[in-house]
Amino acid sequence: MAIDARPPDYIPGRPFLTLLHKEIRRFLRVSSQTLFTPIITASLYLFIFGATLGERISVLPGFSYAQFVVPGLILMGVINNSFSNSASSLFMSRYLGNIVDLLVTPITPPQFIFAYTLAAMIRGLAVGLVVWLVSMFFAALPWHNPLAAVAMAALASFLFAQFGLIVALFASSFDSLSMYTNFLILPLIYLGGVFYPISILPAPWASLSHLNPMFYLIDGFRGAILGVGDLPLWVAFLVAGAMSAALFVWAFYLIGRGHRLSS
Amino acid sequence: MQTPALDIDHLCKSYDGSAAVKEISLAIAPGEIFGLLGPNGAGKSTTINMVSGVTRIDNGAVRIFGHDNQTDYRITRCLTGVMHQEIVIDNFFTIDKALKMHAGYYGLRDDPTWRQLLIERLGLGPHLHKVMFKLSGGLKRRFMIAKAMIHKPRLLILDEPTAGVDIELRHSLWEFVREINQRGTTVLLTTHYLEEAEQMCGRIAIMNQGEVVALDSTRNLLRQLGGRQVEVNLAQPLTAVPTELAHFRPVLADDGNLLRCALDETDTAIALLARLTGLGLKVRDLETRPPNLEDVFLRLTGSHHHGH
C-alpha cells in the first residue's frame, strides 16, 4: 500500500514559477552582460545606420533607411538575447552540474521548457523594447500593425529560446556554444535582411535567402511595422509558426528523454 | 508487510557496455538508517543516482513508499531528498536565496522556521549571504545537506555527507541525522568513514563491483567475523600470505607490513604467534581487538578502504 502522495501544502504551479523566477533573477544578476551590453551594441548600430549612413541610403521607397533598418535591429536584439539566455543558462547548468538540482525535483519536462523559454523571451523582448525606445531618437516608426509586430517578436523569441535549449543540450564546450552564435545565428541574421531588402539582391541570392529562416521573421516583423514587405504577412507567420512548432517538439523530445541531462 | 521506504528491485545500469550496477535488489523499511558501503567504483553513487532520478534506469525498478520512481516521479521526487556526492552549486545565488528557492521547486511555500532550523543545525548562519563560490568545500557540503532536507522528505539520501567536513561538525551533523530519523525520516547513507556507518546504521549493504555482496544488520555483519581480530606488525614485509595461515583468514595491509588475522573462539593469540614464528616470520608487535566494519569490508571486497 503506497503512502499518501505529495505533501498537503503542495502548490501545483509553484515548481514552474520558481524555476521561472530563478531564470529571470539569473539574467538580472548579470544584467551588465545580459541587458546593457546588447542594448549598447544595438544603439551603436542605430547610430551608424540611423544617424550617419542612413541619411545617404534609401532602399525602400517612401521610407528612410533608418525606418527600414530599425525593425531589423529590434528583432536582432530579440533573437540574439532569447537564444543566448536559454543556451547559456542551460549549458552552464549542465557544465557546472547543478542541473541535478532540477532533475531531483518534481519539475516536469513541459514546466522545465516553458520556464526557460519564458525567461528567455522576457530578456529578448526587454532588449527589443529598449532598442525600440532608443531608436526613437533616429526614426519614427509608422506601426502599421502593432499587434502583428508584437506577435512576430514573441514568435521569434519563442523560436530562438527553443533553439537555445537544443544547442545547450548538444554543445560540449563553451567554444562550441559560441560557434553556434558566431557561425550560425549571426550570419543568418546579417544575411536575413536586417540591413537590406532581400528583393534588391541579384537572382540566385534572392532565392537562396528564402531558405534563411531569419528572412521570414525579419520580413514579417518589418512588414507589420512598415506595412510593406517582401512577403505577405501570413506567409511569414506560417513559416515562423511552423519552425517554432518543429523546434518545440524537438526540444520537448530531448528534454523529455533527459537527453544529455541525465546519464 | 509494511511498504518499504525504498524498494530497489533488480536494478541494472551499464555505461558503454560495462555494467556499473548488476541487478541489485534491496529494501529499506520506513524509519531505518541504512548504510550503503563499498569501495570507489562499487556502484553506490550510480544506484543512488538511479533512485533520485539523475541517472536513467536500464532495467529493474525503484519504488519509494510504494510509488514507482519512473512513472510516478512527481510523487517520488517530493518524498525523497538527496544530497549527491559531487559538489554542485549555483554560483548566482547566496545560501539563503538558494534554500528559499529550492523549497519552491518542490511546490512548497518557504517555511522560515524549518529553514532556520536547518541553517542553525548545519552551522550555515554566518555564511547565509555569501555567494556560493566563496564557500569552503565543507560549507558547500553542509549547504547541500540543507538543500536536500528543505522540503522535509520522507526518505533522505546522503551520499558521503561528511567528506571534507571537520570533526566537530561531523558529530553535530550525525546527531541531527539521528534526530531527523527519530522524527520519522528514513535515511540511506554512504560514507567512507566506516566507524560512522557502524555507529549510525542499523543495517548495512556492502557493494562491490556493481553487486551487493553483503546485506545484514550491522551487528550480524560484525558477528560473522567471529571472535577477535589480531593485527600483526611484521618486522619485514610480506608479498603474499603463507598458505599455512589460512585458518586465521589473513589479509595483508600496509604494503605487506601488517597482517590482519581473525581468531575463532578456540584460538589464542599465543597459538597464532607460535605459528608465525614457526614460519620464520619476525613479529614486531601484535594487537588484539574486537572486529569492526573495516574488517568486514576488507574481507568482502578485498579492497582497502581509505578511511581517515
Image (cartoon, coloured by chain):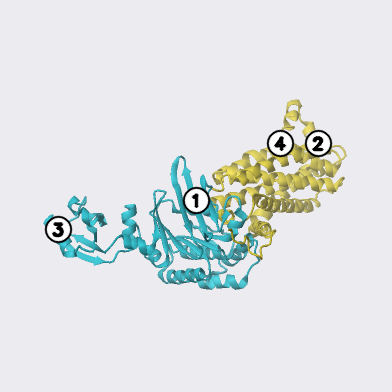
Chain colours: A yellow, B cyan
Q: Amino acid at mark 4?
A: Leu
Tell me whether marks 2 and 1 sit on the same chain.
no
Q: Are marks 4 and 3 in contact (CB under 8 Å)?
A: no
Q: Is residue B166 left or right of B92 when viewed as pictured? A: left
Indicate the chain on which mark 2 is placed.
A
Q: Is residue A225 left or right of B21 when viewed as pictured? A: right
User: Badge 1: how crowded within 10 Å, few (<14), some, or many (20+)?
Assistant: some
Judging by the rendered image, the residue that carries numbered circle 3 is B275
Judging by the rendered image, the residue that carries numbered circle 2 is A235
Label disc, if present, on residue A241 of the rendered structure: none
Judging by the rendered image, the residue that carries numbered circle 1 is B9
Residue A240 higher or lower than B36, as above or below: above
Indicate the chain on which mark 1 is placed.
B
Q: Are marks 3 and 1 in contact (CB under 8 Å)?
A: no
Q: Residue A70 lies in what quarter of the image?
A: top right
Percent across and percent down for residue B250 are: 24, 55
As measured in the structure, the alpha-carbon distance from the residue carrying label 3 to the one carrying label 1 is 47 Å
Q: Of tags 3 and 1, which is closer to the observer?
A: 1
Indicate the chain on which mark 3 is placed.
B
